[in-house]
Amino acid sequence: MSKTALLTIDMQQEYFEGGRPLKVPEGPPVLANVVRLQNAARKADIPLIHIQHMSLDPEGGVFVDGTPFIDLVPESGPVAGEKVIIKRYPSAFAGTDLDGYLQELGVDTVVIAGLMSFMCCDTTGRDAHSRGYKVLFVRDATAAIDLGGIPAQQVHEVTLAVQGFMSSEVVTTENILKRIGEGST
């Protein structure tokens, strides 16, 4: 995994606060798996890049600059020296320096973990694939919300199926930990 980077996407308060429109029902187990992946990446000196979304629409009600809801969840936030990329679009590549940074590091594989599977994780995974990166999309370190009357788990499973069809290798947290050399933790 020497040419791999872990992208933790939008692990922000917006998805974890009660009463917020985007609160993710499976947020706590996703957070636990993201933290496990981050700890393993740090231990193995795998680049860890935190992606943080901020809305282009100050009246949009979610991910608004200056609110506590844009803050990264403390448990999965960056430690000294880790890159944080602010994005304004669903893809972590759009309008950011992510691609150049990954190229600078010699990365050819990205691990996608975070929220939400059907939105920013999916878009980033597809964009990474179209740029020539191998994509490992972590099934149990991503999740969804109910969407248009479709239950969150169904939205998530469809996203995983689409990712696995062409853009990504869909994996589990345990699979990534084993590849890193950590095994079950």
Image: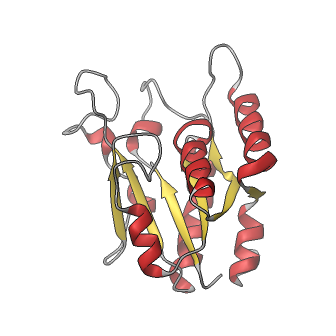
In the figure, 13 relative to 147: above or below?
below
Q: Residue furthest front?
A: 131
Quarter-of-image position of residue 148: top right
Q: Front-most of 152 and 4?
A: 4
Residue pictured at 62% horizontal, 36% vertical: 118
Percent x, y for residue 176?
A: 71, 70
Q: Is residue 163 visible?
A: yes
Query: Quarter of the image containing the N terminus?
Result: bottom right
In the figure, 59 relative to 11: above or below?
above
Percent x, y for residue 27?
A: 57, 43
Residue pictured at 68% horizontal, 80% vertical: 180
Q: Is residue 185 visible?
A: no
Query: Quarter of the image containing the C terminus?
Result: bottom right
Residue pictured at 41% horizontal, 78% vertical: 104
Percent x, y for residue 165?
A: 81, 46
Q: Report whether 31 appears left or right of 96.
A: right
